[in-house]
Amino acid sequence: MPIWLAVTLGGAFGTLGRYGVGVWARALWPAFPAATLIVNVLGGLVMGLLASYAAARPEWSGAWRLGLMTGVLGGFTTFSAFSLETLVLWREGALGLALVNVALNVILSLLACALGLLLGRSL
C-alpha cells in the first residue's frame, strides 16, 4: 500500500474515533473539555506503545508505521483543540479550569506516553 494512502485511511479512522470520544465525553462532562484530555492522554499511550513496538521490529513497513502513528493518531489527538479550548476557558474567566486543563493534558499525556514506551518494550 502506498504510504500516502495508509496515512489518509489512518487519518479517517482517527478522526472518526475522535468524533466518537467527543460525543461520549460531552454527554458526561458538558462543562469541561474532557474529550480533548481523553484523546491526548490515550493518544500519548498508544504512540508510546507503537513507537516501542515498531522500534523492536525493523521489518514493520513504513506504511504501517506512518498509517498508524501519523494517520490514526494524528487524526485522533487534538492539540490544536486543546489550545483553543484552554484559551476560551481563560477568556470566559475560568482561569482555574484553564490551568487545570493545561496541567492535566501535559502531565497525563507525558506519563501515558512513558507508560506506553515501557509496555511496548514487553511486546
Image (cartoon, rainbow, N blue to C red):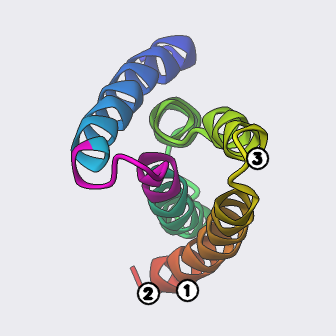
Which quadrant would residue 15 be assigned to in this image? top left
Magenta part of the protein: which range? 27-38
Give the mark nearest the N terminus, 3 or 1. Answer: 3
At horizontal 46% and vertical 83% (from top left) the residue drawn is 119
Q: Residues within 10 Å of mark 3 (few under 14, many from 20)?
A: some
Whether residue 28 appears in magenta in the rendering, the answer is: yes
Q: CA distance from mark 2 to mark 1?
A: 7 Å
* SS type, badge 3: helix
Mark 3 lies on residue: 90
Disc 2 is placed on an element classified as: loop
Residue 19: image location, x then y, percent = 33, 30
In the image, taking residue 17 as reference, residue 67 lies left or right, namely right
Depicted 66 relative to depicted 94: above or below: above
The answer to which image quadrant residue 109 occupies is: bottom right
Crowding near the residue tagged with mark 1, few <14, some 14–19, many ≥20 C-alpha atoms within 10 Å: some
Q: Earlier in the sequence, mark 3 or mark 2?
A: 3
| The stretch drawn in magenta includes residue 103 | no
Q: Is residue 20 left or right of residue 104?
A: left
The amino acid beneath tag 2 is: Ser
Helix, strand or loop at mark 1: helix
- Residue 118: mark in rendering: 1
